[in-house]
Image (spheres, helix red, strand yellow):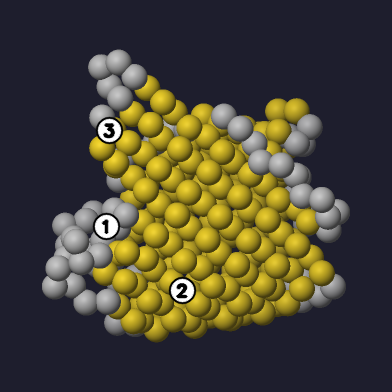
Amino acid sequence: MKRILPITLALLPTLALAENSAEAELGATITSGNTESTSILAKFNGKHIRGDWTNSYKLEALYSEDDNERSAEKYFAEAKTDYPATGRHYFFALVNGEIDKFSGYDYVVNGVAGYGNRLIDTEVRKLSFEIGPGYAYKKVDTDITPDGEDENDLILHVKGEYLWQFSDNAEFKQVLGSDIAFDGATISFSETAVVANLVDSLAMKVSYNVKHNSDPVGDTKSTDTILAATLLYKF
C-alpha cells in the first residue's frame, strides 16, 4: 500500500451530550493532469463516561486511486468498554472489525477481554498498557488466494499507549500493540503522532501509522504504512 499525505477538507459536527468527548479528521488530496490521483482519509474517535464505565468508539476509512485504479481501500470500526473509569487498575472488553481490500483478507474480526493499568495519569503525561486473551477470525480473500483457508486464531492482545502534553499547545502520542496469534498470522500496529493546537478546538496533526502481518496472504506485502498531515477537530 502506498503512503498518502491528506489535507483536511471538512470537519464532522459536534456531539450534543456534555459527557461525550470526541475528535474527528477528514481529509483528501486530488491531482489531475499528467497524473490522476485521489486519496481520502477519515477518522472519528469518541468517548462516553457513564458512572464507572468508559465506552469508546473508533471509525476509520481510507481510499486511494492512481490513474483511475484503486490503490488502497480500508475500513475499520471498534467498540471498547473499560471498568472502572478512574483509578490505576481496570478491566476492558473490545470488539473490532476491519475490511482491507489489499490485505489478502475479505475481513478480520477480533474480540478481546483483559486487564489494563494506568501507570501514569496526570494532566501532562499518561501511560497505560493492556493485556488479555481473545479470538480472531480472518476471512481469506479467495480472489487473491483461491486455495486459501480462513483463519480461526486464539490471540494474546497487548497494547501500550503514551501521551505527553509537552507544551500548552502541543502533545505527542505513541501507541504500540500486537494481536499475537498462537497458530496463525500475528498483526502488529503502531501510531506515532504530534498534535499542535491552531485555534480553539482546531489542531494540526502529523501521524505515521504502521501495520505488520507476520504471515501475509499470497503475494501481499507484510507491512503497510500511512503518513498523514491533517487538521483535527476536538469536541
* Amino acid type assigned to the residue bearing label 2 in the image: Asn
**Mark before the other along the chain sequence, 2 or 1:** 2
Q: Is residue 50 left or right of residue 28?
A: right
Question: Label 2: which residue?
Answer: 110
Which element carries disc 2, helix, strand or loop?
strand
Which element carries disc 3, helix, strand or loop?
loop
Badge 3: few (under 14), some or many (20 or more) residues near its Cα, within 10 Å?
Answer: few
Up-down relation of residue 43 to residue 149 (above or below): above
Question: Of the numbered discs in the image, which one, if any, rests on residue 17?
Answer: none
* Amino acid type assigned to the residue bearing label 3 in the image: Asn
- Residue 171: x and y in percent read 66, 42
- Residue 54: x and y in percent read 74, 68
Up-down relation of residue 167 to residue 94 (above or below): above
Question: Of the numbered discs in the image, which one, if any, rests on residue 68?
Answer: 3
Q: Residue at x 52, y 78 (%)?
A: 112
* Amino acid type assigned to the residue bearing label 1 in the image: Ser
Question: Label 1: which residue?
Answer: 222
Viewer-closest of 162 and 11: 11
Q: Residue at x 81, y 75 (%)?
A: 52
